[in-house]
Amino acid sequence: MKTLATIGDNCVDIYPQLNKAFSGGNAVNVAVYCTRYGIQPGCITWVGDDDYGTKLKQDLARMGVDISHVHTKHGVTAQTQVELHDNDRVFGDYTEGVMADFALSEEDYAWLAQYDIVHAAIWGHAEDAFPQLHAAGKLTAFDFSDKWDSPLW
């Protein structure tokens, strides 16, 4: 079975109109979708020591994602306010929370060695890791979104 680690961005999408919150963010979404296709995922990210951080970790674990490197930091979990207009999502205010200072530790790099593929996105503060991962022979994937001017491109 192939393995994939995701790095970086997570957030809780808060829908005030529905009075609901959902775990999300590129690293979270990719890890969860991998479980549906027979890939064993793990995720490296930071969450706050708030209820949303607990929710995010519980959701990932329930979906079969290795959360041993989802680190809890003092502060708030990243949050996006989302409104629904004619059944379309409209993204509003974003609070980056503890992810603003995200960085990989040497322990995180060592943990990544066990994975076949490593994925991150432009919002995940992980771009500095990719030269080292590439030099180590890792197959990498990076979501640039609409940031085509990134030096990684």
Image: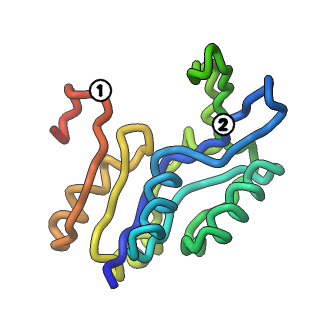
Residue carrying label 1: 146
For disc 2, the marked residue is 13
Location of the C terminus by quadrant is: top left
Q: Is residue 127 above or below residue 32?
A: above
Residue shown at 21% from the left, 70% from the top: 138
- Residue 81 pos. (x, y %): 68, 26
> In this rendering, is residue 113 above or below 11?
below
Q: For numbered disc 2, what is the local secondary structure?
A: strand
From the viewer's perspective, tell me whether residue 18 is left or right of residue 122.
Answer: right
Q: Is residue 131 left or right of residue 117?
A: left
Amino acid type shown at disc 1: Asp
For label 1, the crowd category at 10 Å Cα-Cα, with few meaning under 14, some 14 to 19 and many 20 or more, is few
Residue found at x 44% / y 44%:
124
Q: CA distance from mark 2 to mark 1?
A: 20 Å
Which numbered dot is residue 24?
A: none
Residue 65 spot, x, y in % from top left:
55, 71
Q: Quadrant of residue 21?
A: top right
> Quick one: label 2 or label 1, which is nearer the N terminus?
2
Left or right of 18, for residue 2: left
* Residue 27 percent across, percent down from the top left: 47, 53
| Amino acid carrying mark 2 in the image | Asp
Q: Residue furthest top?
A: 85
Residue at 50% x, 46% y is 9
